[in-house]
Each structure stands twice: as structure tokens, then as C-alpha cells.
Image: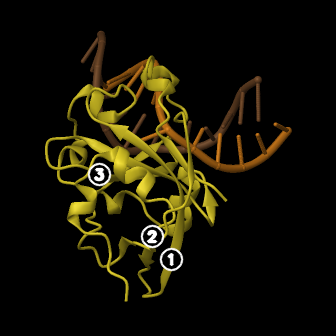
Chain colours: A yellow, B orange, C brown
Amino acid sequence: MTERFGRDFYRQDVLEVAPALLGQQLVRILPDGTSSAYLITETEAYRGEEDRACHASKGRTLRNGVMFGDGGHLYMYLIYGMYWMMNVVTEKEGIPQAVLFRGLREAGGPGRLTRLIGVDKTYYAEDLVTSDRIWIEPTGRKPAYIAAPRVGIDYAGDPWKDLPWRFLMKL
DNA sequence: AACACGATTTCG
DNA sequence: GAAATCGTGTTT
């Protein structure tokens, strides 16, 4: 029986957590009681109010509020009117950071994967440390990975748009 | 009250 | 290459 990641894991800096999530298992319990596990293959880091690509860079709002709270909670938001993005907040209260889930072995793309695993706004602020319907378990694996620039954030300008804060597990 | 836009995906 | 589609933040 594998133990899920606890609060301390999520309270680390996002640049520690984002790559560490690669190769770990995302566990889902659906409303009908069935469970599924997905291997995390791609993540992206958004780091604080300084990071012009991070939603927290424009200050706290109703939407991004959870990012300013304690690590381990989900930050969900709708993009382009049709895709839910799933992020997990990192660091302790007052430090707004989050990891965007960009890919699972079974699905590539942040919009596709939320559709696959069935999460939306009703998971906003869900706590991965205590939830009975979604959490992450360590697999013991520490896969090699590649770091690349983040996607779709050119508007953030230098140096943010070019920082290698997108992490992809090697095959 | 109105408007502009986005951490994307899909189709032609 | 461009449309789809709407909640959120900002401006009027």
C-alpha cells in the first residue's frame, strides 16, 4: 500500500515539485467508485508574483486566490471557454506558486488530460493531501527528464518566456 | 453594462 | 491558418 504525497512535499519550491512529479502516479476515484491511476509525464512551473507568466503576477483575485494558500490544493481555471487546466499549488501560504499538469502517459495536453480524468471547476481548491477522490502517490521512480521553455506564454516577456520551466519525462 | 482575452484543441 | 467558446478581470 503506497502512501500518498503529504503536505511537506507540496510545501517545497515549485521548481523542486514540478520535476519531482514526473513518473509519479495520479490516482482518481470516480463518482461510481471505480479508481484509475495515471503516470505523470509532463509538468510546468509557475513561480510567484515576480513570474510574469504566472496568474499571481497581477495580484490576488477571486480566480487565483487558492494559489496564495497552502500547498497541496488544486488550482483549476477555464481557458478559451472550453478547457479546464489543472494545477497543484506549491509552497506555504503567502507564496503563490503552482504546477500545471501538461501530460499523462495516457493523454497529452493540459486540456485533454482534465477531460480524460474528469476534473473541472468543482475540484477548485481540492486538497490532494486529504481528498478521497484525487491524490498523487510516489512510485519510487526518478525518471530522467528534459527542461524546455513553457508553452503559450510569450506575452510574459524576458526573461520569463524563455525560462526552462517545462519538464518532460524521457521515454 | 460592455469588452477584451486567454498556461488550448481541433479542423480545414 | 483559423475558429470555437465563456469565465474572469478590467474599463466604461
Element type at marker 3? strand
Residue A115: give x, y in percent of width and height: 54, 61
At label 2, which amino acid type do we have?
A: Leu
Residue under pointer 1: A37
Bin the neighbour count of mark 2 within 10 Å (Cα to Cα): few under 14, some 14-19, many 20 and up.
many
Residue A47: name its quadrant. Answer: top left
Label 1: few (<14), some (14–19) or many (≥20) C-alpha neighbours in 10 Å: some
**Which chain letter matches label 1?**
A
Q: How far apart are the two marked residues, 3 and 2, measured between alpha carbons? A: 15 Å
- Disc 2 marks which residue? A26
Which residue is nearer to you in this view: A22 or A105?
Answer: A22
Contact (CB < 8 A) between labels 3 and 2?
A: no
Give the Cα distance between marks 1 and 2. Answer: 5 Å
Residue A144 seen? yes
Q: Are marks 1 and 2 in contact (CB under 8 Å)?
A: yes
Q: Secondary structure at mark 2?
A: strand
Q: Quadrant of residue A95?
A: top left
Counting every numbered tag in the picture gives 3
Residue A85 in picture, x, y percent from top left:
45, 50
Secondary element at tag 1: strand
